[in-house]
Image: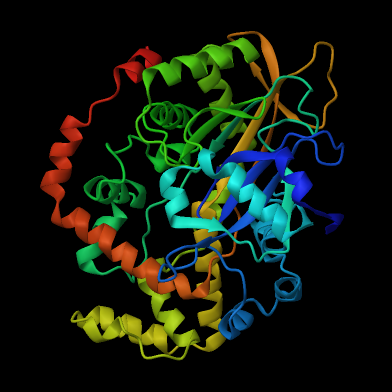
Amino acid sequence: MEMEGVLQAGDAEDWVYKGEGAANLILSYTGSSPSMLGKVLRIKKILRDKSQPAPSCMVFSSYEQLLWGHIPELVGSVKQDCLAQAYAVHVMSKHLGANHVDGGVRVGVSGDFLELVEKNVLNSRPAWRVNASSIDKTADAALLMADHSLFSGNPRGSDCIAVEIKAKCGFLPSSEYISKENSIKKQVTRYKMHQHLKFHQGEISKTSEYDPLDLFSGSKERICIAIKSFFSTPQNNFRIFVNGSLVFGGMGGGADNVNPAETDKCLEDLSKVSGLELPDFIELLSEAIFRSGVLGNLLTTQKLDDHDIEGAIHLYYNIISQPCSICKNITDAELLWKYTLLHSLPLDKSLKIVRDFLVSATAKDCSLMISFRPRQGGTTDSEYDSVFLDSVKRTYEYKAYFVDLDVKPLDKMEHYFKLDQKIVNFYTRNEELVSSLKGSNTKDASLIQLQQ
């Protein structure tokens, strides 16, 4: 779908910085056009360091044509520069549920608009994001979507609280293709291992207490534990918006330590808008996650990766018809035999396994937005699901949407493999260090206070 008209230089002042991920910059509309109210604009970024793997796919190589050729809408969308939209609608919505995926509409943008927007938002962007990427000023279109941090199209409607959760991988792999020296992957989550590498590299100042297995457990008690853990180290996993404005967590997904004053201010804003104290809010969010079942769909989609990268990488080499650079370093005869069997698979099977791996990679990296508003007194019929919160004797409507559903580039497979090995090698080599960190990584006083 496409909107008429093109955003020009004069429109730039109506768009303000909302946040960003690795592949896109998100702008929020502040003007008065009825068709734009309650919308965000998703603009593509390009990496400054061309040697880094692209975070999302913009064009299809001949191998990607092979991989996705059975979905004509996807292949056709590349020419029209609306691949992200087509992938969300024709691939991810089939896995995550069409009612939880918003494909958005394509809107034209002029070069002058992009130039001005980049200038206007520069001071709002985290410095490390600015150093890593810039707006793709060659683009002639962007994606216009509903702002899911608001409940309805009209930001002046009833008060709304929204939470964005980047849940990450919610299961432990059990693939037979994982080497014996990497068997720790079957006992410790990828998220936890990656935290220790990030700490060592100085990307974070303390490791997070968040455990994705809690969030995906299907147990309300464990979901509560996961949500509480976000309050001490939201990092890029957790953000709270009140009436569309960020009140907790990092703008560009880089929040590390949380200032207790920031937490207090957030709780004050939450309380003003909703009348909820923190334990009530955690109960509301846990109940909505538990009742909606949306994480069940997400987990099923993540589990499409049943070979792990240690298996899927071999199928990648089958597809690109190159000698496998992994097999030449394998000394374990049993493992080498298993990998040889993978290399003898027919092309259609190799394509399916790698395709499933890439769909899973999108599901491991996307975010869930859940928005709440108090149900108006006397209203019983509503298109939205609701939660009755016994502690405050009030009903809240909620809606849940997945965002950041970009297609991952096929040529990122080698990067995934190298990063996986780096994460696991660091963790296994430094288990003593990891144990001592665990002892010293005490919870913030503010969080202990929150949990009482």
Q: Nearer the viewer, residue 171 or 233?
A: 233
At horizontal 38% and vertical 86% (from top left) the residue drawn is 341
- Is residue 22 toward the left or the right of residue 430 in the image? right
At horizontal 64% and vertical 76% (from top left) the residue drawn is 68
- Rendered location of residue 82, percent (x, y): 72, 65
**Which part of the image, by quadrant, shows the C terminus?**
top left
- Is residue 118 toward the left or the right of residue 93 in the image? left
- Rendered location of residue 27, percent (x, y): 65, 43
- Rendered location of residue 135, percent (x, y): 58, 57
Residue 221, relative to residue 436: is it above or below?
above
Q: How many marks?
A: 0
Q: Nearer the viewer, residue 445 or 318?
A: 445
Tell which residue pokes out farthest to the left in this image.
432
**Which part of the image, by quadrant, shows the N terminus?**
bottom right
- Is residue 88 toward the left or the right of residue 210 in the image? right
Residue 235, relative to residue 422: is it above or below?
above
The colour style of the image is rainbow
- Rendered location of residue 210, percent (x, y): 37, 36
Q: Quadrant of residue 95?
A: bottom right
Q: Nearer the viewer, residue 139 or 194?
A: 139
The reply to whether residue 110 is in sight is yes
Q: Quadrant of residue 232?
A: top left
The reply to whether residue 170 is in sight is no
Residue 39, relative to residue 344: is it above or below?
above
